[in-house]
Amino acid sequence: MTEDELSSLAGRIRQDSKRLARFSKDEDRKGRTDLLAAAKLLERSLFHIERARSAPAVSEPIQAEVGEMLDIEIQEDLLEANKRIAQANRALLAEHGVVAIDVMGAIGSGKTSLIASIVEKLGKRTRCGMLGGDVATSIDADMVRQKGAVTVQINTGKECHLDANLVRRALERIDLSRMDVLFIENVGNLICPAEFDLGASRRMVVISVTEGEGMVVKHPMMFQDADVVAINKIDMAEIFGTNVRKLESDIASINSRAIAIRTSARTGQGLEDLVRALSLGPLA
Ligand code: MG
Ligand code: ZN
């Protein structure tokens, strides 16, 4: 379907929905709530069409090339080089007043859903973006783009983490002067992403109550530098019999500075606290 066809479809739906609403209010059809409901339903589909139309366009993913981590002198230590590029990223983001959040966590912990929910919560007043690090697909970036964020997909190929250089390349694709908050969704992995500074100003780790109570103690590195830890899928804690207090005390014992928040992208629990803990914009 073309952009024009979509626009004329939206026009027709808008007219039909108004006609239905008028029709349901005719003298002899008083109380025809079914007709009114149909009109509302059309209005609702209109909302979704408009939102799809206003979603930013998809851009080509950035592909990591074999042996990349480039711009690096052969002799130079990999992590040192990463640190240097991360500093440059941080300076660039700060210069444009963009708050960048490195979002880390295991596969299936709910990083993407949580980002999508925050973007929705922030609403239109805060301009959001997401760099989605994924081994191959753009499923995650697409999900967040639906909520109105500008997204750039980074396909890491074999790599199991993002590095500062991949982020640097992705930042070149974004108009930072028109962005307030940038989520950098790391590859799902609780180990090496902790080692690679990306240049973000905050680090958020997402864990899920479905991952078991040993999650935190098994991966202390991941929590050492976290600013915020989301204990996600909290609505499932009872079903899985997870001791959430243990997770919280494990986090506190590794990093007393980290703010742990119980969240559920599904029920919306804790989302406002999360937005506050990350010091993001006003809530919609
Ligand atoms: Mg994801
Ligand atoms: Zn890795």
Image (cartoon, rainbow, N blue to C red):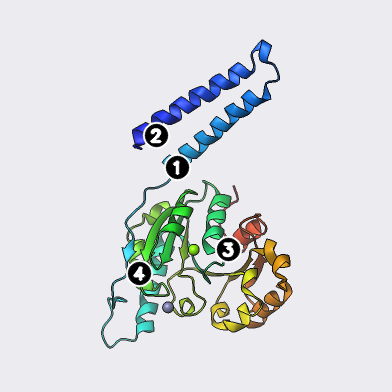
Residue type at tag 3? Leu
Q: Marks 3 and 2: which is nearer the front?
A: 2
Q: Residue at x 60, y 50 (%)?
A: 283
Q: Hey, what amino acid is under mark 1?
A: Ala
Q: Are marks 3 and 4 in contact (CB under 8 Å)?
A: no
Choose mark 2 or mark 4, whichever is in front.
Answer: 2
Rate crowding at label 2 as few (under 14), some (14 to 19) or many (20 or more) other CA atoms within 10 Å.
some
Viewer-nearest of labels 1 and 3?
Answer: 1
- N-terminal-most mark, 4 or 1: 1
Callout 1 secondary element: helix
Mark carried by residue 278: 3
Residue 52's disc number: 1
Task: State the separation of the CA atoms marked 2 and 1.
Answer: 10 Å
Q: Which residue is mark 2?
A: 6
Rounded to the nearest angstrom, the CA distance separating label 1 from label 3 is 28 Å
Characterize the local packing of mark 4: few (<14), some (14-19) or many (20 or more) Cα atoms within 10 angstroms: many
Q: Residues within 10 Å of mark 3 (few under 14, many from 20)?
A: some
Note whether ligand 1 is within 8 Å of mark 2: no
Give the x, y percent position of residue 33.
68, 25
Q: Is residue 45 left or right of residue 89?
A: right
Looking at the rendering, in which quadrant would you find the N terminus? top left
Residue 69 bears which disc, if any?
none
Residue 154 visible, this angle = yes
